[in-house]
Amino acid sequence: MAAWYLGGRQRWLFLSLGAAITCLIGWLRMAQGAHFMTDVIGSVLLVWLTAHLLSIALYGIEYRMKDDPTT
């Protein structure tokens, strides 16, 4: 997920790869009976929020906005 905030042309590749690995590990943990789906979703949201806040704290909002073509 950190590669998304660093930018670059391969950000979607890294985001997709990270999402696929996260889904696989989450599914395996649910199949083992160790986690519920809400545990997995909550963990993903917590990690995303932490990465987002650290990105703003370290690089500033201006850095993210100039690299984002949607703004």
Image (spheres, rainbow, N blue to C red):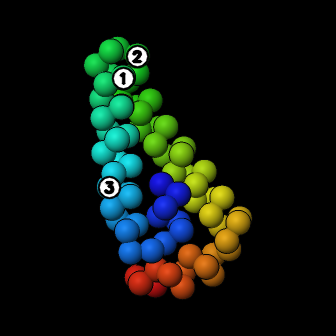
Asked if marks 1 and 3 touch (Cβ < 8 Å), the reply is no
Amino acid type, residue under disc 3 in the picture? Ser
Mark 1 and mark 3: Cα distance apart in space: 20 Å
Q: Quadrant of residue 13?
A: bottom left
Q: Which numbered disc, 2 or 1, marks the residue that appears first in the sequence?
A: 1
Q: Where does residue 50 sit, x and y in percent of width and height?
A: 60, 51
Residue positioned 30% across, 45% down in the render: 20
Q: Which numbered disc, 2 or 3, marks the residue that appears first in the sequence?
A: 3
Camera-nearest label, 2 or 3:
3
Helix or strand or loop: what does disc 3 sit on? helix
Q: Where does residue 49 sit, x and y in percent of width and height?
A: 56, 52
Residue positioned 46% across, 80% down in the render: 68
| Residue receiving disc 1 | 29
User: Is 55 situated above or below 23?
Assistant: below
Asked if marks 2 and 1 touch (Cβ < 8 Å), the reply is yes
Amino acid type, residue under disc 1 in the picture? Arg
Count of all numbered marks drawn on residues in the image: 3
Q: Quadrant of residue 30?
A: top left
| Residue receiving disc 2 | 34
Amino acid type, residue under disc 2 in the picture? Ala
| Residue receiving disc 3 | 16
Mark 2 and mark 3: Cα distance apart in space: 25 Å
In terms of depth relative to the viewer, which is nearer, 40 or 17?
A: 17
Q: Where does residue 53 sit, x and y in percent of width and height?
A: 64, 59
Residue positioned 31% across, 25% down in the render: 28
Instruction: Say whether residue 42 is left or right of residue 58.
Output: left
User: Is 10 situated above or below 69?
Assistant: above
Mark 2 and mark 1: Cα distance apart in space: 5 Å
Residue positioned 48% across, 72% down in the render: 7
Instruction: Say whether residue 22 is left or right of residue 48.
Output: left
In terms of depth relative to the viewer, which is nearer, 7 or 48?
A: 7
